[in-house]
Amino acid sequence: MPESRTVPAHAANGARRPQAAQGSGPVAAAATPLAPTWWVWLAAWPVTAVFILSNAATPLYVLWQRDIGFSKGTLTVIFAFYIVGLLGSLLVSGVVSDRLGRKPVLLPALGLAVAACVIFATASSVAALIVARLFTGIAVGAVVSAGMAAVTDVAGQARKRLAALLASCAMVFGAGLGPLLAGVLSETVPGPTVTVFVVEIVLLATAVLAVLRMPVRRPVAPPKGAWVRVPGVPQGNGIQLALGIAVFAPGITATSFVLSLGPSLLSGLLGTTSRVVAGVMAFAMFIAATGVQFAVQKLRRRTILLTGAVSTTLSMATLVVAVHTSSVPVLIASALLAGAGQGMGQLGGLSLLNSIVPPERLAEANAALNVGGYVPAGVLPVSAGYLSDAVGLTNGATVFATVLMALAVIGGLVVVSTPRRAPEPT
């Protein structure tokens, strides 16, 4: 969306929106006043609402495994279909959002998320779980591109740092709240695999209302290039994208492993069967991802990325210790470090892109960052699941942790070795 949407600061100081701003086009866009800060926070709510759904099923898989009957390998395949839907969505949603606007992408995505809730609540087969996860992935792909870009649009040029922080925290907070909500509700109310999705439908309905009222304008720039393509960034911004992916990809792969096989580790290896414990562990992981972003937000972006790579490396080392000592506290420590690694990798990557990519390509750039992150996040945990079926959970987790530790170290080295061609953008 064009940068002319944001007007000088005096227009934001209580001024009423001019009547001309009710139209469309460059003139109307230029007359739009800066949205109040509370709208920047509210614009992040649809991201949170969809990400609550993204992981709400995590504590419930042990129930579906018991009732339907499937292996850990099948469980990771169900999880992987979420990645398939997400990646397919990212090939389209970023470009479409930049060309048609944020709302035409977000509203259908929220509708698809509601459909996923209905399928989850009535699922009685692996096929139903796969379809529900596929729909969830498509919805998530839309919000990580169009939804996060919408937060930046509402914030305006002067609040890019705040926009990156809120968009990133909305994602990880929602991702953590989902399994906590599901774990608690499934242990305390009737219908353990139904109630949480009824609650989520209500949350998604409020997100629809927020999108309908969101103060964003449709873009006025003419479309260029193919509508369906591998998302990328404008020429000259590739280094920023590579730096973000180098740290974000290992971080989100680590948290994906905890989400897909964490309950199996707790119930099978460590002897803990409580769905609340599984949900609390996932929630704590993403609370760490949220809190660390507020803690490091004023640091240099490269420092944030490097610290994220170190955190993911330590997480995998701790995971190896956890599975070989059958220690729940050490496993939780590994999850917390994984969350911090993802959070810093995500914040660093989004901040770099927000600082340099023009608004009319921002949703596509967000999609490119997430494609780079979610490809290994889908492939490696699935491989670990099947490997665990073949050689045991301890050996499978150890191999996974070793591979990901190496990738995290490489990511840190990429950050350190990449030359600073210019002063870091503010």
Image (cartoon, rainbow, N blue to C red):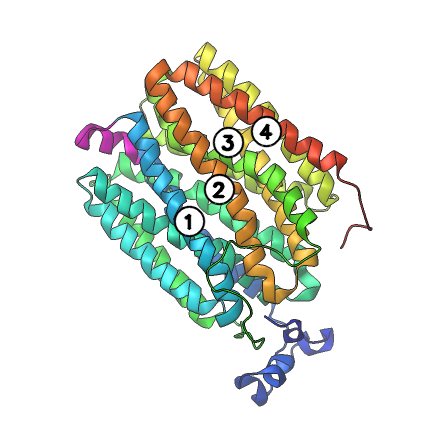
**Residue at the (68%, 46%) spot, across then down:** 297
Residue 374, numbered label: 2
Nearer-the-camera pick, 304 or 18: 304
Residue highlighted by disc 3: 254
Q: Is residue 65 magenta?
A: yes
Residue 320 position, x and y percent, is 51, 16
Q: Amino acid at mark 3?
A: Ala
Instruction: Work out which quarter of the rendered image holds the C terminus and state it.
Output: bottom right
Say whether disc 1 or disc 3 marks the residue closer to the N-terminus.
1
Say whether disc 2 or disc 3 marks the residue closer to the N-terminus.
3
Q: Cα distance, mark 4 to mark 2? A: 14 Å
Is disc 3 placed on a helix, strand or loop? helix
Residue stretch rendered in magenta on the structure: 60-70
Nearer-the-camera pick, 158 or 137: 137
Q: Amino acid at mark 4?
A: Leu
Q: Amino acid at mark 1?
A: Leu
Residue 407, numbered label: 4
Say whether disc 1 or disc 2 marks the residue closer to the N-terminus.
1
Q: Amino acid at mark 2?
A: Tyr
